[in-house]
Amino acid sequence: MYGRKASEVQAFVEGKPQLGFALILQLTGVNGSQQFDKLTKTKTVESILSSLDANGIQSYIDHLVSQIDEPESTS
């Protein structure tokens, strides 16, 4: 079942690559998991990444760099 859904997500992102980055943030962000693909035993995030356009890839790289540059909270 997950495999079919992953292919639908990939087809969606291929049709609208500008939305791929936003979708990745939802799947891997605060309300998702950075281990989304592992937990769901799919390649959903991987397939979205492979479907991103140049702007989406740059946005994803900028996001990753910002995660590294953020100081850790001391709570």
Image (tube, rainbow, N blue to C red):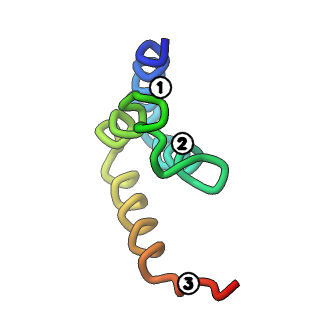
* Residue 8 higher or lower than 36, as above or below: above
Q: Amino acid at mark 1?
A: Val
Q: Which residue is identified by label 1? A: 9
Q: Tag 3, which secondary structure?
A: loop
Q: Look at discs 3 and 2 and give the one toward the viewer.
A: 3
Name the residue nearer the viewer: 44 or 74.
74
Question: In the image, 27: left or right of 57?
Answer: right
Q: Secondary structure at mark 1?
A: helix
Picture quadrant where residue 13 is located: top left
Residue 54 percent coordinates (x, y): 31, 52
Q: Which is more N-terminal, label 1 or label 2?
A: 1
Q: CA distance from mark 3 to mark 2?
A: 25 Å
Q: Amino acid at mark 3?
A: Glu
Q: Residue at x 36, y 31 (%)?
A: 43
Q: Is residue 8 above or below residue 42?
A: above
Return the x and y of residue 48 as percentages of the image width and height. Answer: 39, 37
Image quarter where the C terminus lies is bottom right
The image quarter containing residue 10 is: top left
Classify 10 Å Cα crowding around label 3: few (below 14), some (14-19), many (20 and above).
Answer: few
Q: Nearer the viewer, mark 3 or mark 1?
A: 3
In this rendering, would 22 be left or right of 41?
right
Q: Is residue 22 left or right of residue 50?
A: right
Q: Amino acid at mark 2?
A: Leu
Residue at mark 3: 72
Residue under pointer 2 = 23
Residue 4 is drawn in which quadrant? top left
**At x 54% / y 48%, what residue is drawn?**
33
